[in-house]
Image (cartoon, rainbow, N blue to C red):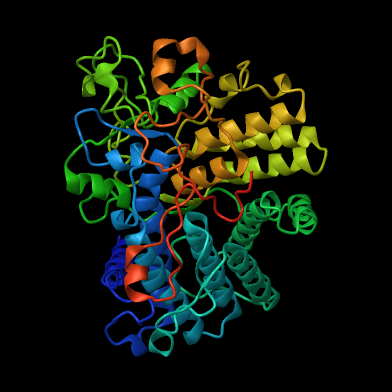
Amino acid sequence: MKKILLYASLGALMLTGCNLNINDDPDYPNNSAVSADLIFPAIENSIAATTGDQMFNYGGFFAQYFEQMPEANQYNSFCEQTLYESSQVLDRCYRTIYAGALEDVKTVLEKTTNPADIFAATVLRAYAFQLMVDNMSDCPYSEALQGNANSSPKWEDGKTVYLGVLGEIDAAEAALTSSSAITVTDPLMSKSLSQWKGFANALRLRMYMRLIDGGIDAATYTEKAKALVQANNFFTGDIKFDVYMDQKGQYNPWYAGKDALGTNNHCAAHPIISYMSSTSDPRIAYGFLKNAAKDVYVGQMPGAKTVMKSWGTNTDWKNKDVSAFDYDLKGNAGHGKPVYFFTQAELQFLIAEVDVRFLNNPSGAKTAYEEAIASDFSARGMAGQETKFLTGAKVNWDGATTSAEQLHLIYMQKWVAFFYMNHMEAWSEIRRTDTPNLSSHTGKEIYENPSVYNAGDLIIPAVNGLESGGLIKRLFYPKVARQLNKNTPAEVPISTPVFWDVK
């Protein structure tokens, strides 16, 4: 209990800096007297506060897990892709990452000479920058965090940032010795250096795959990805920030936001419900409720909330007609749900992909694929139920006889496994792999003739504010950055892919 209260207090302290210029030092009381040991948990908390709240929320809409409840309006702009720079979707995450996580990393690096602590802080720094790049492609990097010495840092392209932080991880790991040991307070991995090394390798693998598919020195990063998988020095279990509980002030950050609003805004989207139904996936009950009208799972067509009443018999389309989101997880598990930085399922799916694409190792890929699904079932408290599920015709590995079929299976099941675990990475992997596929039919066409639809395909929103149609590929630069940093680039349309999304 004392540890949880300490982490929560540090997180609250960190969040007081959210309205600061990202180039100014946060106003920590007696900062010179605060040790690296006490600052380090705030780094982890800052990242959890972004990936586990705002990014989790909009990522869930962009991955077409969520839709807006028919009788609520909080998130119409996400469903209908009517977003603008003035919407400030990324602003709070941007402030929390820079004025919180990255500023705290900088302080820790200034306050310690311990190579293990430096390594762990550097891994978190790389993860934070990865998140910024994957949201908007460019961000302040080499000139960031200099305070008044440089109040308008230059923005650098995502490739530069990715390569820069990967180099930082390599250098920090090379400085470790056989006697290195983590000394800072570490709720994420309990001071396990081997887990930190495994996390670093998984983070490398995630980023290598994006560099490869982005056409950035693909041959070199393919060899690096192969070497990582063959060495198999990864973390065990899940990398999760598990400090929350069923108590006000200690809730999971996304649940806390929902609790503060006091409104049930989220219902299931048609793509995820249709796919999980088609594969008889018991995980459909994890996070989704059957609708009140007919006691069945029903997902709403993306972006169709405001037009559904004009579709055939939907003249009285209400909350009762769709599957609401189960925020509480059949009790109160959602209140204290951890924030996942990297799941074992994601890791094993990446390993399976490398086995198929680069190592010509289908048996290894099958093992990793099945382990990924088993790990996800286990993380949801559903261990054992995957055995029957894996025999299903639409998910059984042996039914996929070509590399293309195997990869599609890996990518689709990864999409499912990210649901209610890590929605930011779900959105990123959809963009990297182009899976699920994008349906060539409109939501109205699919509603009127379900036979034209392939279960799980993404659907272009029925009401779509995107200037060129299609789906969102990035977010606008934060309005706060434009207000405070004269070097913030000109606005880029959100239909423009990030640097690694070149397909």
Residue 410 placement, left or right of 457: right
**Quadrant the C terminus occupies:** top right
Q: Is residue 404 left or right of residue 450?
A: right
| Residue at 36% in and 40% down | 465
Q: Residue furthest left?
A: 262
In this picture, residue 208 sits left or right of residue 376: right
Where's residue 490, x and y in %? 44, 65
Q: Residue at x 29, y 53 (%)?
A: 87
Residue 298 placed where, x, y %?
35, 19
- Along the line of sight, the residue nearer the viewer: 188 or 469: 469
Q: Residue at x 38, y 28 (%)?
A: 269
Snapshot quadrant of residue 70: top left
> Looking at the picture, does residue 200 appear above or below residue 60?
below
Q: Is residue 211 above or below residue 125?
A: above
Q: Residue at x 53, y 47 (%)?
A: 428
Q: How many marks?
A: 0
> 178 or 320: nearer the eye?
320
Is 478 rendered above or below residue 289? below
Q: Quadrant of residue 311?
A: top left
Residue 116: x and y, percent? 59, 75
Quadrant where the image shows the N terminus: bottom left
Residue 190 visible in rendering? no
Residue 482 location (% of width, % of height): 36, 69
- Choose between 340 and 73: the one closer to the eye: 73
Quick check: can you spot residue 55? Answer: yes
